Image (spheres, grey):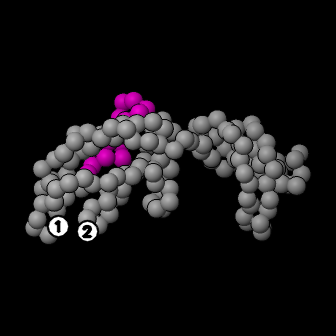
């Protein structure tokens, strides 16, 4: 039976084929760690892979609350669950503008609860747009839609 070990916690898994396995993880401590596998529960593979456990981030504050629209604005996003930091280059923000979506790399600020993202110009052709612009954040370095929050 396939065994999986993450942060010292062992749990069962199922091999789907020669390259893919599936499992349900128990509660794990948050942070960057490693994942390793064993086919028999005794002999573990020598090359563990990086693995991150994080809580879903929640943005509670976004400031400044506005900009001129004709130039990019550096926005600070503060909230909960932003402390997971395997690498700073894994932070991204995605802005949902009326005519396009823009994904930009974020920068971690001095503390673990604030990141900075550059908001794009909010224009449509030659017209400045007003109103709210939704934003999502990912901590794990991907531009896949389902891994943003």
Q: Residue furthest front?
A: 131
Residue underneath mark 2:
99
Mark 1 surroundings within 10 Å by alpha-carbon count, few (fewer than 14), some (14 through 19), many (20 or more): few
Residue 73, image x, y percentages: 20, 47
Q: Mark 2 falls on what kind of element?
A: loop
Is residue 51 located in the magenta-colored stretch of the structure? no
Is residue 105 located in the magenta-colored stretch of the structure? yes
- Closer-to-camera residue (2/147): 147
Rounded to the nearest angstrom, the CA distance separating label 2 from label 1 is 7 Å
**Residue displayed at 41% across by 49% down:** 137
Please identify the dominant SS of the magenta region.
strand
Sequence-first tag of 2 and 1 = 2
For the question of whether residue 105 can be seen, the reply is no
Apparent side of residue 23 relative to residue 64 in the rendered image (left or right)? right
Q: Are marks 2 and 1 in contact (CB under 8 Å)?
A: yes
Res. 124 mark? 1
Which segment did they paint magenta?
Answer: 104-119
């Amino acid at each position: 039976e396939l065994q999986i070990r993450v942060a010292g916690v062992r749990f069962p898994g199922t091999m789907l084929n020669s390259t893919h396995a599936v499992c349900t993880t128990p509660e794990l401590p948050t942070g960057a760690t490693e994942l390793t596998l064993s086919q028999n529960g005794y002999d573990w593979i020598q090359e563990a892979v990086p693995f991150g456990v994080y809580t879903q981030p929640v943005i509670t504050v976004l400031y400044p609350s506005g900009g001129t629209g004709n130039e990019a604005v550096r926005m600070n996003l503060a909230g909960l669950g932003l402390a997971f930091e395997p690498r700073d280059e894994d932070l991204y923000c995605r802005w949902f503008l009326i005519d396009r979506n823009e994904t930009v790399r974020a920068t971690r600020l001095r503390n673990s609860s604030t990141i900075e993202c550059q908001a794009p110009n909010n224009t449509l052709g030659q017209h400045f747009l007003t109103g709210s612009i939704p934003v999502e954040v990912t901590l794990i370095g991907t531009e896949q839609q389902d891994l943003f929050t």
